[in-house]
Image: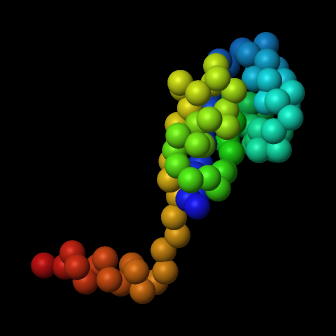
Amino acid sequence: MARYLVEVPHDADTMACANAIRVFLETGSHFLANAEWGCSDGEHKAWIILDVESKDDARSVLPPNFRPKARIVGLNRFTLQQVDQIVREHQG
């Protein structure tokens, strides 16, 4: 399974924030009910980390009206050995 960061923007006005949060909470989805929100800091987005098979699967977790604007980023971690190998491969 892969890990994805899902970023879901919404309009910046108070009613848009309330609506987006309500939609997420009312879905009954554990993933959506536990989204992190940036609205209180002026960043009108929700963030979720999902462990699913694909970007399409990550997008399908979202309510349909939020899917088109969502940004989905595949996440990974590196070991020091991997970084050393990358450096060795790219040194001139």
Report the quarter where the C terminus lies: bottom left
Please tell me which residue is depicted at 61% across the width and 52% down the height of the picture: 52
Please tell me which residue is depicted at 86% across the width and 35% down the height of the picture: 28
In depth, the one of 6 and 54 nearer the eye is: 54
Q: In the drawing, does residue 39 fall left or right of residue 5?
A: right
Which of the 4 image quarters holds residue 13?
top right
Place of residue 73 in the rendered image (x, y in percent of width and height, measured from the top left): 51, 48
Is any atom of residue 36 visible in this view? yes
Is any atom of residue 43 visible in this view? no
Above or below, 67 relative to 16: below
Q: In the drawing, does residue 60 fall left or right of residue 77?
A: right
Place of residue 60 in the rendered image (x, y in percent of width and height, measured from the top left): 62, 35
Above or below, 45 relative to 87: above
Q: Name the image colouring.
A: rainbow
Residue ranking furthest to the left: 92
Please tell me which residue is depicted at 52% across the width and 69% down the height of the picture: 77
The number of numbered discs placed on residues in the rendered structure image is 0
Report the quarter where the N terminus lies: bottom right
Q: In the drawing, does residue 50 fall left or right of residue 73?
A: right
Above or below, 76 relative to 46: below
Place of residue 63 in the rendered image (x, y in percent of width and height, measured from the top left): 69, 27
Please tell me which residue is depicted at 60% across the width and 43% down the height of the picture: 58
